[in-house]
Image (spheres, helix red, strand yellow):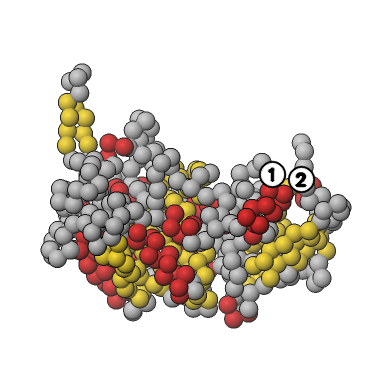
């Protein structure tokens, strides 16, 4: 059996701490959170959202019972109720912008999203975000009046976001968590665009965006029934990469190690805290010819992924509710209705988000300015910058990760202590990929950061 060179490492640092005991790796809170989301709560919320008839972006905004206006006001009130239950721990508000002159929004329309912010206790300007979409659509993307129940696409993702807020608002975390109900997705991803722009204006350090789009269907159009797998889509190279950064990446690697891709690997690891769930990482930003609300965040330079069901059923997406008789006499049902949502499965994928958000918000910020050196040398050295103490009072130290260049997941790691560099003796830099993660005193870890601009999660 071939051993990775890094298995034979000896570590030397300016202030060696490798002999120190690493923080505990068992995190009982995450196991508790892995079963905390309620399928009954998610079902209730999906039914309420379906009950608005249509949530099309161009639909009625004044009716108290039908259309996008009634839906977003209900979401605002629901976040407010959740906040009241936790003593006002959520900051609930609207984020909006006006769109006009676009193919799917020809006239001026105010696209209004709802967000609930749970402020961090130590590093409040570091943000982890979970989102679902308010809006729905029928077969004709411009049809703003016909019924468009959108039970799975995407009442399921929005109901999961509401339920995550109910669960996590019972706790306090060092970093800030945002629960976002985004509008205008079907008409051009405008809700995500406006929130990403606000995050840039406000100087948010966005560590992760988990976009949940269709998390409730278990029966695919391919005939497969699967209630134990989730897919996570992630971009391979950063959308904001400069020409100079691309040239450096060509020679040093990083095509598979954008912050979004390492966020996807992190989510896959978190699935161990959710019973009977595994994550299939998909190495592309989204499905062929399609998009989701993580994309505007990627385009703004933020790590963002799409979390969704393993098998889609296209008869239940973007379809008028109807039945058609086929030439062989079989009846084919169309429409995104309640009978296409498995609420226990939606709760399971919500739990995947919950444990991931909790772990990210509990961990110290990812190491910044990670660098690697060792060309034509028997040794490899990694360096990084530690955060200000006030931002990471729970920081215990760092863990170095490595994997074969063809391995999909980080396969090996070693605790190196609370240092800012490490030298790996007799380890040739050419043969493996390396990364560094920050570790809290309770064992919570940040995502792994690949060296250089290709893998950077940003600074402090």
Residue lying at 25% horizontally and 47% vertically, measured from the top left: 141
Residue lying at 59% horizontally and 81% vertically, measured from the top left: 390
Q: Is residue 92 left or right of residue 382?
A: left
Residue 385 visible in image: yes
Q: Which residue is mark 2?
A: 431
Q: Is residue 4 left or right of residue 136?
A: right
User: Which disc number belongs to residue 426?
Assistant: none
Q: Which residue is mark 1?
A: 405
State yes or no: discs 1 and 2 in contact (Cβ < 8 Å): yes
Whether residue 110 is situated above or below residue 57 in the rendered picture: below
User: What SS does tag 2 mark?
Assistant: loop
Q: Of the residues under marks 1 and 2, which one precedes in the sequence?
A: 1
Q: Nearer the viewer, residue 178 or 8?
A: 178
Spot the residue most to the top.
328
* Quarter of the image with the N terminus in it: top right
Q: Nearer the viewer, residue 276 or 76?
A: 76
Spot the residue most to the bottom.
390
- The answer to which image quadrant residue 445 occupies is bottom right
Q: Position of residue 267 (x, y in %)?
A: 51, 53
User: What SS does tag 1 mark?
Assistant: loop
Residue lying at 56% horizontally and 67% vertically, measured from the top left: 363
Spot the residue most to the front.
101
Q: Position of residue 110 (x, y in %)?
A: 26, 65
Q: Position of residue 42 (x, y in %)?
A: 29, 55
Q: Position of residue 19 (x, y in %)?
A: 78, 65
* Quarter of the image with the C terminus in it: bottom right
Q: Residues within 10 Å of mark 2 (few under 14, many from 20)?
A: few
């Amino acid at each position: 059996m071939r051993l990775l060179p890094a298995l034979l490492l000896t570590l030397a640092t300016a202030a060696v701490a490798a002999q120190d005991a690493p923080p505990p790796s068992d995190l009982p809170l995450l196991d508790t959170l892995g079963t905390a989301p309620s399928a009954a709560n998610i079902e209730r919320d999906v039914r309420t959202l379906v009950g608005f008839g249509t949530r099309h972006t161009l639909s009625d905004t004044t009716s108290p019972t039908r259309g996008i206006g009634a839906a977003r006001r209900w979401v605002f009130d629901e976040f407010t109720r959740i906040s009241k239950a936790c003593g006002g721990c959520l900051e609930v508000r609207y984020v909006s912008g006006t769109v006009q002159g676009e193919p799917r929004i020809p006239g001026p329309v105010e696209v209004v999203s709802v967000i609930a912010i749970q402020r961090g206790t130590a590093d409040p300007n570091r943000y982890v975000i979970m989102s679902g979409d308010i809006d729905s659509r029928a077969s004709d993307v411009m049809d703003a009046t016909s019924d468009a129940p959108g039970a799975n696409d995407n009442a399921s993702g929005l109901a999961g976001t509401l339920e995550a807020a109910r669960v996590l608002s019972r706790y306090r975390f060092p970093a800030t968590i945002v629960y976002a109900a985004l509008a205008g997705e079907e008409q051009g991803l405008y809700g995500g665009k406006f929130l990403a722009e606000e995050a840039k204006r406000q100087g948010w350090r966005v560590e992760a965006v988990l976009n949940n789009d269709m998390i409730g269907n278990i029966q695919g159009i391919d005939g497969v029934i699967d209630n134990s797998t989730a897919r996570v889509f992630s971009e391979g190279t950063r959308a904001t990469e400069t020409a100079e950064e691309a040239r450096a990446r060509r020679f040093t690697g990083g095509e598979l190690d954008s912050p979004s891709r390492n966020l996807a690997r992190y989510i896959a690891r978190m699935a161990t805290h959710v019973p009977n769930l595994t994550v299939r990482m998909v190495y592309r930003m989204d499905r062929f010819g399609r998009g989701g609300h993580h994309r505007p965040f990627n385009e703004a330079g933020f790590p963002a992924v799409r979390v969704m069901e393993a098998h889609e059923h296209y008869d239940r997406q973007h379809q008028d509710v109807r039945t058609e008789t086929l030439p062989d006499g079989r009846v084919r049902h169309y429409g995104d209705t309640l009978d296409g949502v498995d609420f226990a499965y939606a709760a399971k994928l919500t739990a995947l988000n919950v444990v991931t958000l909790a772990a990210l918000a509990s961990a110290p910020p990812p190491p910044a300015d990670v660098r690697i050196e060792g060309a034509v040398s028997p040794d490899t050295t990694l360096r990084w910058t530690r955060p200000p103490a006030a931002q990471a009072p729970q920081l215990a130290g760092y863990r170095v990760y490595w994997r074969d260049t063809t391995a999909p997941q980080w396969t090996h790691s070693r605790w190196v202590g609370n240092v800012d560099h490490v030298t790996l003796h007799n380890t040739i830099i050419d043969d493996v990929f390396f990364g560094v993660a920050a570790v809290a005193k309770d064992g919570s870890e940040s995502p792994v950061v690949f060296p250089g601009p290709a893998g950077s999660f940003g600074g402090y």
